[in-house]
Image (cartoon, grey):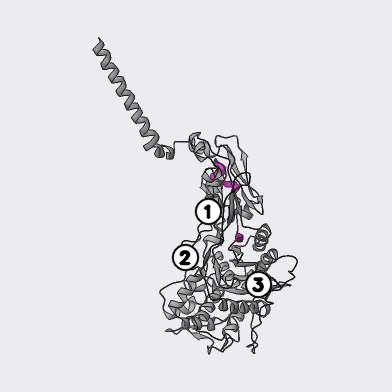
Amino acid sequence: MIRHIRWCAYFCALLLAALLVNLARVQVWESAAYGADPANKRPAIERYAQPRGDILVDGRPVTGSRDSGEPLRYERTYRDGPLYAPVTGFSSQTYGTSFVERAEDAVLAGTDPGLTAFPLWYDLARGRPDGGNAVTTVRAALQRAAYAGLAGKRGAVAAVEPATGKILALVSSPSYDPAALSGTGAGVKAAWTRLNADPARPMLNRALRETYPPGSTFKIVTAAAALDAGTVTDVDAPTRTPDPYPLPGTSTLLPNAATGCEDASMAEAVQWSCNTVMAKIGVQVGLRAMVEAARRFGFDDEGLRVPSWVSRSNFDTDMSQDQLALSAIGQFNTTATPLQMAMVAAAVANGGDLKSPYLVDRTTQGDGDQVRRATPHRLGRAMSPSTALRLQELMVKVVEDGTGQNAAIPGAVVGGKTGTAQHGVGNAGTPYAWFIAWARARGAPEPTVAVAVVVEDASAVRGDISGNGAAAPIARAVMEAALPTTPPAAAPGGPLKPLKPRATPGTRPAP
């Protein structure tokens, strides 16, 4: 009898050991698989069991949370949702997250270890601290000016602080209200279907994710390449360029939208946007030097994060001479995001030093204590300081007495460059209107803001589309919002030196 009891005890011990082994298997080796199983609702319930942290603009939250009373308890809310959608993105219980909501999800959801001094305690207690906040670099006044300027037209605006890389405005139009995607149910699914089927693509962040031919705004890059390479040593010297210009190796003639571009100098070509002169200069610089110059500005970089990823701006590395000529004026396969072109303007404004753009200034705990803070990061030197100074002078001339006069701001020094980019098969598409610029209060030590605007207005009359007409007024409004209302008293270094006087070729229309 005792022997049978002993064997029964051995069997029970074996069953207990098997149970413990299986428990360890489930809890350790297969816990991740069970946690990720779509049938497991516990992670989702836990994720939305408490309010999400907020995204802040000018110190004020532009997001919130509401108690839905459903199993996934707290849903995301947005203040001025369409205005800030390109910044915040969406946080949806059905479709996940995007942009800052995605990039800073761990802080906002309360799962970042930096939110507490005792992360192990929360792990053991199967809890989490309150969601933290993401404080953005965006300034509300600039964001509103850009959004109002686009007025629902397809297009985008990106504005940065040249000295630091802070993104001051990021607008994409038309936009959408991310609150429509926050919860669950048929209404959210219908909104998702409707937004994705909309031909205007309101969920596309045109400032970060769409690339356009930059047109004549790219001539700033070409001019920088020419000056740094020594191809052009005197910006006021005649270039012996015919009008129209025969593209190398072809019988195709490249015309100008402006008049009086024959034999114009590089300074005049920038001022009046002469295609022929800048195309010829690009060919003289050569493919290798043009590629290197474009890359110094950020083109062909696939790793840019702000912290959301940014589409790669393109400058081809293998081209024929005629293709290089077109690329040098922002056509052929050259494409850029609005943020990339704002970086071009910022590099000129910052003396050739290019800062990495960033959108989140710092993350904090719910009570405001800092978790992490961003620091300005240098991407590299886009051009020499002397080249940057010369380009500043050329861009100021564009605004003071050139194709970009609609960007002029009384009491401020403004440099800009217009662009009208052709696209589509045989250039049949309605052109894109571009304007890039920077501004500083007169007497200030350095520029305050650099901005890029692109407008793709399909309803406009083709002949009426221009960077000066469609895009420059929007850039001006954004720059005005960035500049101090009271001009500084000191004027270190004085105003920019004027260009050397030279007889201006015939009257030119603003392209």
Q: Quadrant of residue 291?
A: bottom left
* x 32%, y 27%: residue: 18
Callout 1 amino acid: Ala
Q: Is residue 422 above or below residue 200?
A: below
- Of marks 2 and 1, the one in the foreground: 2
In reply to whether residue 93 is colored magenta, the answer given is no
> x, y percentage for residue 41?
48, 36
Instruction: Please state, as top left, top right, bottom left or bottom right, where the C terminus lies in the image.
Output: bottom right
Q: Is residue 469 left or right of residue 216?
A: right
Q: Which residue is mark 2?
A: 301
> x, y percentage for residue 59?
66, 52
Count of labels in the image: 3
Callout 3 amino acid: Gly
Residue in front for this viewpoint, 117 or 420: 117
Q: Which residues are magenta?
A: 164-190
Q: Seen from this angle, which residue lies furthest front?
A: 117
Mark 3 vs 1, N-terminal side: 1
Instruction: Please state, as top left, top right, bottom left or bottom right, where the N terminus lies in the image.
Output: top left
- In the rendered structure, are the residues bearing label 2 and label 1 in contact, judged by CB atoms less than 8 Å apart? no
Q: Quadrant of residue 318?
A: bottom left
Q: CA distance from mark 2 to mark 3?
A: 31 Å
Q: Which residue is mark 3?
A: 469
- Helix, strand or loop for disc 2: loop
Q: CA distance from mark 2 to mark 1?
A: 30 Å
Which of the numbered marks, if any, corresponds to residue 281? none
Whether residue 219 is visible to the viewer of this picture, yes or no, is: yes
> x, y percentage for residue 476?
67, 68
Q: Which residue is mark 1?
A: 197
Q: Seen from this angle, which residue lies furthest top?
A: 1
Residue in front for this viewpoint, 172 or 311: 311
- In the rendered structure, are the residues bearing label 3 and label 1 in contact, judged by CB atoms less than 8 Å apart? no
